[in-house]
Amino acid sequence: EVVLTQSPAILSLSPGERATLSCRASQSVSNSLAWYQQRPGQAPRLLIYDASNRATGIPARFSGSGSGTDFTLTITRLEPEDFAVYYCQQRYNSTFGQGTRLELK
Amino acid sequence: QVQLQESGPGLVKPSETLSLTCTVSGGSMRSYYWSWIRQSPEKGLESIGFIFYSGSTNYNPSLGSRVSMSIDTSKNQFSLRLSSVSAADTAIYYCARRKGGGYYYDVWGQGTLVTVSS
């Protein structure tokens, strides 16, 4: 079973700053990795699929990169609505990472 | 714009069967995998399984034979049944859409909390 490990668990930043979130797979998942954002009381929302493709309607400040076992979600110039929990998910058994909470500093 | 809405009891007794239905509006069910995912503080986000519009299914092995799914495309609905529930099955249950051949979930329901308690 492929295990996804996200880091850091909590990231404290201010609006306007750049956020870099990591997701590491226990074995290669090629580019079959997605990122989701979950705001309090809401369902997860697809941000990125196939490691680097933005989903429909996702702002350009969100970008994804990586392949194999190491992946990164970058949010340039944080907006107030970006403070949420972020999850990665891979194809092979549809498992999710444990999440990174992006909190207001 | 496709929307999903879960419905079903919010409270289930231990050892009984959890049953939820997801209603799809604003689009066709064809060519998609219709999925159930749950979220709890203990286990995080967990894929339960999915059903194709044709009726073929794929379940999370960790749930064994307790899980079953069905689909009624004439009603634009699909359903989840989870038998012999325990407190460990207490979670928010989401239905979601997954593209045929894909793995990611591009449309989600709002989620429904199911509590297992006597």
Image (spheres, helix red, strand yellow):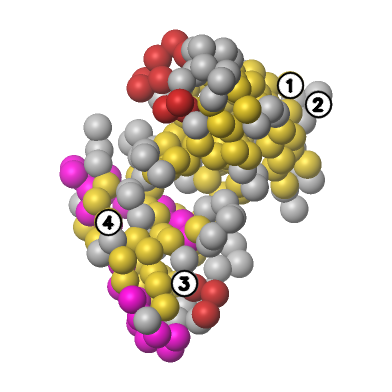
Q: Chain of mark 4?
A: A
**Which amino acid, by three-letter code, is at mark 1?**
Asp
Residue located 42% across and 78% down the image: A104
Q: Return the residue at label 3.
A: A83
Asked if badges 2 and 3 are on one and the same chain, I answer: no
**Which amino acid, by three-letter code, is at mark 2?**
Lys
**Which amino acid, by three-letter code, is at mark 4?**
Gln
Q: Return the residue at label 1.
A: B72
- As measured in the structure, the alpha-carbon distance from the residue carrying label 3 to the one carrying label 4 is 16 Å
The quadrant where residue B79 appears: top right
Tell me, for residue B75, which label it has, or none: 2
How many other residues sit within 10 Å of disc 3, few (<14), some (14-19) or many (≥20)?
many
Residue located 71% across and 33% down the image: B7
The quadrant where residue A51 appears: bottom left
**Nearer to the camera, B77 or B88:** B88
**Image coords of residue B28 (percent x, y):** 74, 38
Helix, strand or loop under label 4: strand
> For the residues carrying marks 1 and 4, which lies nearer the camera in this image?
4
Seen as rendered, the residue at the extreme bottom is: A16
> For the residues carrying marks 3 and 1, which lies nearer the camera in this image?
3
Residue extent of the magenta highlight:
A12-37
Residue located 61% across and 67% down the image: A57
Q: Chain of mark 3?
A: A
**Nearer to the camera, A20 or B93:** B93
